[in-house]
Amino acid sequence: MNKLDVAVFRNGDNYSYLLSQSSRAVLIDPADGHSISTYLKKHSLTLATILNTHYHADHIAGNRILKEETHCLVIGPAKENIPGCD
């Protein structure tokens, strides 16, 4: 069984969580796309999915940059206006 790695990114009073196994990753509530992008490259990770738990500008701010760079799937609540949501 492969180990699940968890990286936590703090942006002000918000946190983003990157869960990875082998070279694939899932990101929860990307507050800052730039620091997460740097981390992905440094650790040779492929971002497969972004999960937005809800809409708040400071929880979804990294969606667009990360989707543009990685072509990942972005999911979140259907009735909330989340940029880049598939």
Image (cartoon, helix red, strand yellow):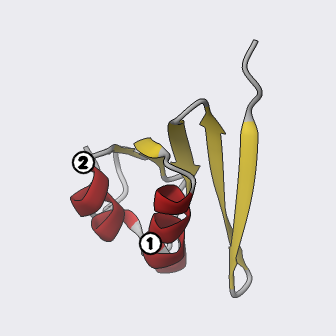
Residue 35 horizontal side relative to residue 8, left or right: left
Residue 10 horizontal side relative to residue 73, left or right: right
Quadrant placement of the N terminus = top right
Q: Is residue 49 visible?
A: no
Residue 36 horizontal side relative to residue 64, left or right: right
Q: Which residue is mark 2?
A: 71
What is the total number of numbered labels drawn onto the structure image? 2
4 over 1 or under it: above or below: below
Image point (74%, 32%), residue name? 4
Q: Circle 2 — which element? A: loop
Residue 82 horizontal side relative to residue 56, left or right: left
Q: Which residue is mark 1?
A: 33
Residue 2 at what x, y percent from top left? 72, 20
Residue 69 at what x, y percent from top left? 27, 60
The mark found on residue 48 in the picture is: none
60, 27: nearer the viewer: 27
Q: Amino acid at mark 1?
A: Gly
Image point (44%, 72%), residue name? 33
Q: Circle 1 — which element? A: helix
Mark 1: few/some/many CA within 10 Å (<14, 14-19, 20+): some
